[in-house]
């Protein structure tokens, strides 16, 4: 949470502002939040429809907020629950770091390497023009792949460690796609929280 940490990296990218803080939460705090979120969050597995076929989403998700605004993506509409005290605390920490107020958090639980999140941008209209998205990772390290829509050579990867924070802002959701790919490696559970502002 130290603003002047040497582990705070600003990536110099076209059409995006991306900041990665490797040890936003230290190991003990990250362990604490992983365990309590795993237990207390109301995890669900939604169906998604792609080209008329229905599949189970390849991960568990949940939506929490300080309002009752639903959030829709990939033909799913999620109704939020009210922030738990832990989510409220994390929200305050992330707001302080990113200088931005959030209303909602979408949580993902990747149970193993077979769970994933395919190429997409967080560009739903209710997020506004250039959304600030603060993404906290807990548990197993997974690579975050991102690629520019128009510039072929702009493809990158960041390993999102336990307790790390990635902040996406600027034009990133217009010009870039991101994913968490499946892996054959035998890896454990990972929880990701993306704090967003719903207008
Ligand atoms: O799990 C992650 O790190 C990314 C999650 C994500 O992109 C999303 O929920 O929109
Ligand atoms: Fe995303």
Image (cartoon, helix red, strand yellow):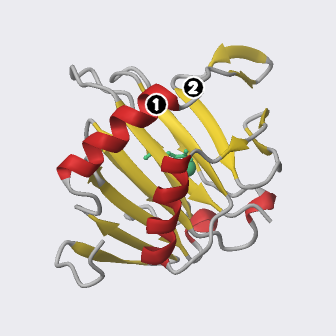
Q: Residue at x 54, y 49 (%)?
A: 85
Q: Identify the residue at the far front of this view.
A: 85
Q: Residue at x 60, y 27 (%)?
A: 42
Q: Residue at x 26, y 20 (%)?
A: 184
Q: Secondary structure at mark 2?
A: loop
Query: Is disc 2 surrounded by few (<14), some (14 to 19) or many (20+) residues within 10 Å?
Result: some
Residue 69: horizontal and vertical position, in percent?
A: 83, 50
Residue 137: horizontal and vertical position, in percent?
A: 36, 48
C-alpha distance separating marks 1 and 2: 8 Å
Give above or below for 142 relative to 157. Answer: above
Image-based side of 92 in relation to 62, left or right: left
Marks 1 & 2, CB-CB < 8 Å contact: yes
Q: Upstream in the sequence, badge 1 or badge 2?
A: 2
Q: Identify the residue at the far bottom of this view.
A: 4
Query: Which label was assigned to residue 109?
Result: 1
Q: Secondary structure at mark 1?
A: strand
């Amino acid at each position: 949470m130290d603003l002047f940490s040497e582990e705070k990296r600003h990536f110099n990218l076209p059409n995006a502002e991306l900041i990665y803080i490797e040890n936003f939460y230290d190991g003990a705090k990250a362990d604490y939040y992983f365990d309590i979120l795993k237990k207390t969050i109301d995890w669900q597995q939604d169906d998604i429809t792609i080209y008329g076929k229905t599949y189970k989403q390849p991960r568990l998700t949940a939506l929490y907020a300080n309002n009752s605004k639903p959030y829709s993506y990939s033909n799913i509409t999620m109704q939020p629950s009210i922030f738990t005290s832990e989510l409220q605390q994390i929200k305050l920490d992330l707001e302080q770091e990113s200088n931005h107020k959030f209303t909602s958090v979408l949580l993902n639980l990747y149970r193993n390497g077979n769970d994933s999140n395919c190429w997409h941008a967080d560009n739903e209209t209710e997020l506004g023009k250039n959304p600030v998205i603060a993404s906290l990772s807990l548990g197993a390290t997974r690579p975050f792949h991102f690629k520019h829509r128009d510039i072929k050579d702009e493809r990158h990867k960041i390993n999102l460690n336990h307790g790390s924070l990635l902040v996406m802002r600027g034009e990133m959701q217009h010009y870039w796609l991101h994913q968490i790919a499946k892996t054959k490696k035998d890896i454990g559970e990972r929880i990701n929280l993306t704090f967003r502002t719903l207008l």
